[in-house]
Amino acid sequence: DTGVSQNPRHKITKRGQNVTFRCDPISEHNRLYWYRQTLGQGPEFLTYFQNEAQLEKSRLLSDRFSAERPKGSFSTLEIQRTEQGDSAMYLCASSLGGGMNTEAFFGQGTRLTVV
Amino acid sequence: AQSVAQPEDQVNVAEGNPLTVKCTYSVSGNPYLFWYVQYPNRGLQFLLKYITGDNLVKGSYGFEAEFNKSQTSFHLKKPSALVSDSALYFCAVRDPKIIFGKGTRLHILP
């Protein structure tokens, strides 16, 4: 499968614990995006990378959230001291280049449940 | 700031009938618009994108979208709906990040 891969697919954690998600983009895609989606809502932008550079981070993202893409390939999203409000589907997407008419391809997502 | 709006939370259509899912946009400059579909417990799948100069854009699974500059709309259409088209549909715009509408749930009734 050469699509965007996200791991794990599901994560259940206790409030206050730290969690880390991984995203492997489509090979050679230099742009990588993270989104959060709650039930019945549209995906909410979190952050995106051009290669290893983080170009934009949503103001909605608290200091507990951090993302990295150290070698310009895979990316990780870490949430520290999780709260129940963090329960959501976390989606990763990648695109080839930053052209405005370039579509992004999404992974299956990681569903986080904070109990 | 770029944005899109989907005025309908849900659309119900009988199988075999034409369907329309509405989207309006607000952009500065040229619009770069997309439609995505999401099936239950799945990620988003790209359907189609607006190509400058084409008022009717064809995409996957028999879907097409009609761009109307004067009405700032980019409505998703299909001539004959299938039950398998039932899903959540999102309109989106490039910012350059991708900004999504809140989604429209499409129910195709057998």
Image (cartoon, rainbow, N blue to C red):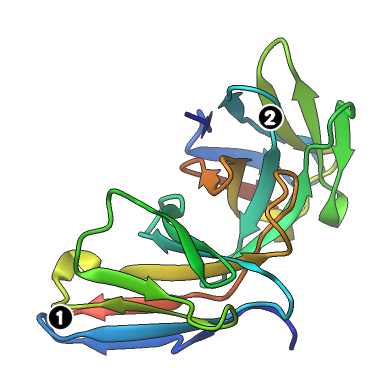
Quadrant of res A11: bottom left
Q: Chain of mark 2?
A: B
Answer few, some or many: residues within 10 Å of disc 1's Cα (few below 14, many 20 plus, some between 14 and 19).
few
Q: Which residue is mark 2?
A: B31
Amino acid type assigned to the residue bearing label 2 in the image: Pro
Q: Residue at x 46, y 54 (%)?
A: A43
x, y (%) of residue A45? Answer: 43, 53
State whether discs 2 and 1 lie on one chain.
Answer: no
Q: Chain of mark 1?
A: A
Q: Secondary structure at mark 1?
A: loop
User: In this rendering, is residue B9 above or below B7?
Assistant: below
Seen from the viewer's position, the closer of residues A12 and A78 is A78
- Does the rendering let one see residue A87? no
Q: Is residue A87 left or right of residue A1?
A: left
User: In this rendering, is residue A33 above or below B102?
Assistant: below
Q: Residue at x 51, y 72 (%)?
A: B41
Q: Is residue A17 left or right of residue A107?
A: left
Seen from the viewer's position, the closer of residues A71 and B60 is A71
x, y (%) of residue B15? Answer: 76, 47
Q: Which residue in the rendered view is the most extreme toward the left?
A: A16
x, y (%) of residue A15? Answer: 11, 80
- Does the rendering let one see residue A111? yes
Q: Is residue B57 left or right of residue A100?
A: right
User: In this rendering, is residue A91 above or below B92?
Assistant: below
Q: CA distance from mark 2 to mark 1?
A: 42 Å
Seen from the viewer's position, the closer of residues A91 and A99 is A99
Answer few, some or many: residues within 10 Å of disc 2's Cα (few below 14, many 20 plus, some between 14 and 19).
many
Amino acid type assigned to the residue bearing label 1 in the image: Val
Tell me the number on the disc at residue B34: none
Q: Secondary structure at mark 2?
A: loop
Q: Which residue is mark 1?
A: A115
Instruction: Between label 2 and label 1, give the one nearer the viewer.
Output: 2
